[in-house]
């Protein structure tokens, strides 16, 4: 069985003044997504797949290296998660789901796009189930802890 291997890094941290901060590019991307889609977010993470071809395209002699981001919102009684590809000048929504029903909704644009290696419905379910089962992976971390991980 070919198991999908990945790791997740929360990108939001509490500053010394308890404000929430994060790396400029992913935070600006998430804010733009929130503005355009009407979805609020209070969780942001980067996801890396062991297979570097996943959700990438060929470019010159290598792969594009697009950032893969989890943009999410932790509600009092639910968790909404979405997976996005930050293409640099635009973004591609891959899928989204709520923990309450765990129904993975693939976006039509993702289904039409070509990548060296795409994730199928079951692989996306595995990623989302992992995040729903381990929401602490998306927690906002104290700045001291974040700066030690970088």
Image: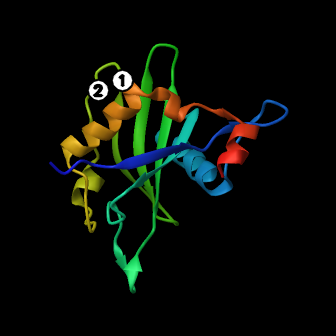
* Structural crowding at the residue carrying mark 1, measured as other residues with C-alpha within 10 Å and reported as few (<14), some (14–19) or many (≥20): some
Residue situated in front as seen by the camera: 101 or 5: 5
Image quadrant where residue 43 sits: top right
Q: Residue at x 25, y 66 (%)?
A: 114
Name the one closer to the observer, 73 or 139.
Answer: 139
Residue at (84% x, 35% y) in the render: 16
Mark seen at residue 99: 1
Q: Is residue 18 above or below residue 118?
A: above
Nearer to the camera, 116 or 40: 116
Left or right side of 102 for 63: right
Q: Which mark is residue 14?
A: none
Spatial CA distance of label 2 from label 1 is 5 Å
Which percent across, then down, holds residue 131? 40, 33
Residue furthest toward the top?
A: 77
Q: Is residue 34 above or below residue 40?
A: below
Q: Describe the element under mark 1 as helix, strand or loop.
A: loop
Instruction: Please state the horizontal and vertical placement of residue 73, each as a whole percent of the image.
Output: 51, 30
Residue 143 visible within the image: no
Q: Residue furthest left?
A: 1
Residue 39 x, y percent position in the rendering? 49, 35
Marks 2 and 1 in Cβ contact (< 8 Å): yes
Judge whether residue 25 can be spotted in this image: yes
Q: Residue 123 is drawn in which quadrant?
A: top left
| Residue depicted at 66% across the width and 34% down the height | 141
Picture coordinates of residue 66 (x, y %)? 45, 64
Left or right of 83 on screen, residue 108: left
Q: How is the image coloured?
A: rainbow
- Callout 2 secondary element: loop
Q: Which residue is mark 2?
A: 102
């Amino acid at each position: 069985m070919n198991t999908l291997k990945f790791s997740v890094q929360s990108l939001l941290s509490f500053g010394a003044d308890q404000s929430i901060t994060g790396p400029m590019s992913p935070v600006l991307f998430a804010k733009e997504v929130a503005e355009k889609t009407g979805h609020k977010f209070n969780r942001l993470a980067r996801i890396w797949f062991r297979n570097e071809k996943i959700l990438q395209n060929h470019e010159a002699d290598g792969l594009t290296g697009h950032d893969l981001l989890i943009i999410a919102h932790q509600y009092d009684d639910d968790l909404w998660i979405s997976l996005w590809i930050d293409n640099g000048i635009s973004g591609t929504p891959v899928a989204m789901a709520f923990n309450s029903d765990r129904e993975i909704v693939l976006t039509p644009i993702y289904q039409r796009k070509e990548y060296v290696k795409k994730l199928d419905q079951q692989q996306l379910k595995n990623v989302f189930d992992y995040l729903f089962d381990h929401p602490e992976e998306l927690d906002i971390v104290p700045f001291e802890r974040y700066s030690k991980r970088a």
